[in-house]
Image: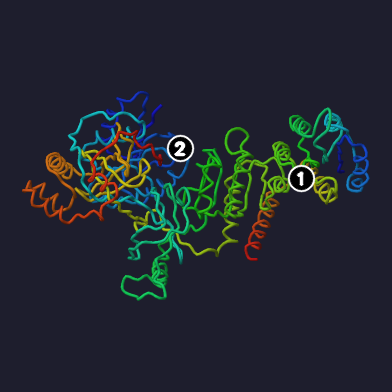
Amino acid sequence: MKIILYHGRDTIFFNELKVASETLIDCEVHQSSPEADSLREQGFILKPHIIFMDAVHTKTLTEEVRWMKTLPLFQSTVMGALYQAESEVRNGEILLVAGVNLFHVLDTDSESFIQDSFQIAFGTRRLGREFSRAKDLKVQFSVGFFASLASVGHDTFTVETDLNLADSVSLTLPMSISAPMEISTSTEGGMVSPFLKTYEVKYPFAGPWETLDENSLQPETVETWIDLRKDKFDPRKRHLCLFTQDEKLIRNLPKKTSACWYQIFSHSEDAAGKLYQSNPGIIFFDLSDTEGPDLGQLAEVLRALREIDSNPLLVIFNSKSDSIAMRKIFEYEYILSVPTKFDVQLFLIFEKAFLEKNSSGEERYFLRPDDEERIIILDRLVILTSITERNLTFIIDSEIPYYTIARIDLPFPAYLTIVPSEGQLPVNRKGNHYSAIIHGLTNKNLADLRKVVHQLSYKSVTTLTKELVEAMLRQDDLPKIFEEQSAALTADRMPDSVVALKRDGRFSLKKNFKGKSKL
Amino acid sequence: MKNLLIVDDESLLVENMTFILAPYATKVFTGSNGKEGLRVLETEEIHCVVCDITMPVMNGVEFIKEARKKGFEVPFIFYSAYGNHELMLEVSKYGAFDFLSKPDFKDVEAIVSRGLTEGFKRKNPGLQSENDLISDYQLLLEKIQTGKDK
């Protein structure tokens, strides 16, 4: 059974959703009220494949979405945020970082948005209108991939992203520093948000031999920045891990802001890389009689802990064997066996005792889930190869996991969700060819985008610029602008894939890139 | 009253263990395999079992499995399995209390004494408390913190 939940109040959208869902076999559509119902609770009750939500109260929703998307139960749930106005969309970007997959402005084409969501959730072929496509393009433009500044320390900070980063990354930090920065460690999984990777990055402090100027970063700058916003950081400083498949148990965890970040795993395989970054103080293991974490998985968790040289306290609920026996079996000193089933009250007592003993510790500050300064954009140059008003395809040097979210400012401010293409996309030697859903556009932008698509179908364009887009909308004489573009564009500024394309222009038909997916 | 059951197919070992542990228990019962051990559990009030793993007729794994099936929640202390991770894991599924190393049986008196106390508590549930658990937990936290401070 396909379950769709609309957590909102727009009757028109809900009716359109019901009509669209009739194209699906075995589908139920539910509606809940943001005023009366909790999104989290509705999620546990219905276990929907898609959740659409009115995003009016972005700040409240952000923590709900973040928490849900870090749970195994909701990892594959497609989430779409609905806005009344364009201005709200830009302010709602923090929801994309929290785990929302698509944006929609309510007075625009809902049918296409809903079909896009079905495509992501169920892999169904897009129904509805076919859009005109400008094809065989080789247009260079910039795409900004969303990442998250999870925490800051005094020497390093952590960034969550879906992208594979090299040894260094160029970033702009909220303390107004923009420079290449050295990566010290990388681990699988997001530290607190549903990203695929976490990187620990060193601040590019000016060395003692360097001449200081206004662009130099000094430790005092970071200290001052941290000091000034101490009240704005999240009060949670430590991680607690819980291994369980018991949904009832997860549902009964504290609903208000807890004292620690909870990392919940259903299987030891999920945990291996993530434990290194989070360095949990306690791991709670809910031993299962039937399905769920068992002694074998407990052994794997301990193996992972030894590899990362970490020794948290391991509390094992529903354990038939005594603590001392378990310590001898697993050759690990810090095990406490609890013979009874997982108990939330006991869990809270343990959490409180842990925090009292660990009130001081590593100085690391986490940004709140709804703090817009979390948002980091990783800009990448890509080659646009085709575009419609709902979809575009592009070539990029690196590998991008499916369902990664990005932002574009040209031709108009909009958002992209990378999706598997419906057909084969040709590739060349150097680049990976991707398809992306365009979303978050207003009616005006849509109308203008149609004009640009039409123009691109007939004009040869190599780079998208603001001036060019404006000229296209005015339907100016474009050749003069193209001449200026060609002169400005030199090979050493282009990604390798572009150079390869421009040099030989040949494509070889290969199977479409079957990359990683974050859903 | 705290009664002990020792189960092993090596009669000399049983004799030695009985001699060592007699001061700590009210009565000591013995058996040469798991089947005999089960019979004793069914007829006598036992507060702790010390048991070998490899025995003829019924080995230690089968013994604890059958004992739990019949509702005997008495603490089981195993030896000879120590160091054999697979066997230790196997018996832990049914609730091992502790393990003794063979042949030196280091700390056997302390371990069995603890087992008898635990067995007595299990038969008198009012004596167990959540506070014991929380104390153990806090002790472990202290231990970790001390380890970090070094």
Q: Position of residue A121 (x, y in %)?
A: 36, 34
Mark 2 or mark 1: which is in front? Answer: 1
Q: Is residue B44 visible?
A: yes
> Along the line of sight, which residue is nearer the eye, A195 or B23?
A195
Q: Are marks 2 and 1 on the same chain?
A: no
Q: Residue furthest top?
A: A25
**Three-letter residue code for mark 1:** Asp
Residue A289 found in image quarter: top right
Q: Residue furthest front?
A: A504
Q: Residue furthest left?
A: A477
As drawn, A275 above or below B80: below
Q: What is the number of the mark on residue B98? A: 1
Q: Is the image coloured rainbow, by chain, by secondary structure, or in one colour?
A: rainbow
**Three-letter residue code for mark 2:** Phe
Q: Is residue A42 visible?
A: no
* Chain letter behind tag 2: A
As drawn, A356 above or below A383: below
Q: Position of residue A93 (x, y in %)?
A: 31, 50
Q: Position of residue A330 (x, y in %)?
A: 68, 46
* Chain letter behind tag 1: B
How crowded is the residue under tag 1: few (<14 C-alpha within 10 Å), some, or many (20+)? many
Q: Residue at x 40, y 52 (%)?
A: A165
**Rendered-image quadrant of the C terminus of chain A:** top left
Q: Circle 2 is placed at which residue position?
A: A44
Q: Residue at x 61, y 37 (%)?
A: A288
Q: What is the number of the mark on residue A235? A: none
> Along the line of sight, which residue is nearer the eye, A168 or A32?
A168
**Rendered-image quadrant of the N terminus of chain A:** top left
> Along the line of sight, which residue is nearer the eye, A456 or A330?
A456
How crowded is the residue under tag 2: few (<14 C-alpha within 10 Å), some, or many (20+)? some
Q: Position of residue B34 (x, y in %)?
A: 83, 31
What is the spatial separation of the Cα atoms under label 2 and label 1, in whole angstroms?
A: 40 Å
